Image (cartoon, rainbow, N blue to C red):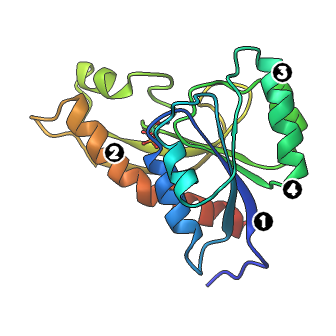
Amino acid sequence: MVKFVGKINTAVFISGRGSNLKNLIKFSEKKISPIKIILVVTNNKNAKGLNFAKNKKIPFLINNFKNKTLSENKTIKRIKKNKIELICLAGFMKILTSNFIKKYKHPILNIHPSLLPKYKGLNTHQRVINNNEQFTGSTVHLVNSKLDSGKIILQRKIKILKNDNPKTLEKKILKLEHKLYPDAILKLLANF
Ligand code: GRF
């Protein structure tokens, strides 16, 4: 088994429901987990997922990202202050600028509900169904300055069944993601 020296200070960025955040918090509490979630960042003050941070008394930062430069600068400042060495985007609906990515010297991960490089962007489930795909899935990748395009860390797929629709796919993929994201973090950090 891989041994980690201490846990890595981690921030999770969310915009809405936060089921991946909830699951990452659960994962971070396990002994084998290499991460410690010490900050949640959101652009949406009404994000449901903030409740998971509140319940666990994890500090959170709300920046609306309307003025991107200002919000990113405030976020970077806090992230540096908290010595955060891993950022996990989990349903974060804002695109980070290349300036942010350049300034932040540690890995930024994102989870995207498709088999990248296919179906970057939004409405993936509807698009895979429209295209009669046989498989779909989810991907954890490093974030670079192009949307959903950084190096793939881990990906898992499921078969699309005849009676699947965007709702059923979303449900199945979320379930898969709750295992995929922790596994991807373990894989990424094992190589450091
Ligand atoms: C997930 O499907 C993730 O892949 C995508 O946004 C969704 C977020 O869900 N980027 P949740 O907010 O974690 O429940």
Judge depth for marks 2 and 1 and give the one in front: 2
Question: What is the CA distance from the residue labelled 1 to the residue labelled 3?
Answer: 32 Å
Question: What is the CA distance from the residue labelled 2 to the residue labelled 3?
Answer: 34 Å
In the image shown, does 20 or 190 lie closer to the viewer?
20
Please name the residue that numbered disc 2 is placed on: 173
The verdict on label 3 being within 8 Å of ligand 1 is: no
Tell me which amino acid carries mark 3: Leu
Which badge, 2 or 1, comes first in the chain's sequence? 2
Q: Are the residues flagged by discs 2 and 1 in contact, CB closer than 8 Å?
A: no
Judge depth for marks 2 and 4 and give the one in front: 4
In the rendered image, is residue 104 in sight? Answer: no
Say above or below: 139 vs 52: above
Please name the residue that numbered disc 4 is placed on: 83
Tell me which amino acid carries mark 2: Ile
Would residue 72 be found to the left or right of residue 17 on screen?
Answer: right
> For the residue carrying disc 2, how many other residues have a C-alpha within 10 Å: few (<14), some (14-19), or many (20+)?
many
Q: Residue at x 76, y 18 (%)?
A: 68
Please name the residue that numbered disc 1 is placed on: 192
Tell me which amino acid carries mark 4: Lys
Question: What is the CA distance from the residue labelled 2 to the residue labelled 1?
Answer: 28 Å
Please name the residue that numbered disc 3 is placed on: 70
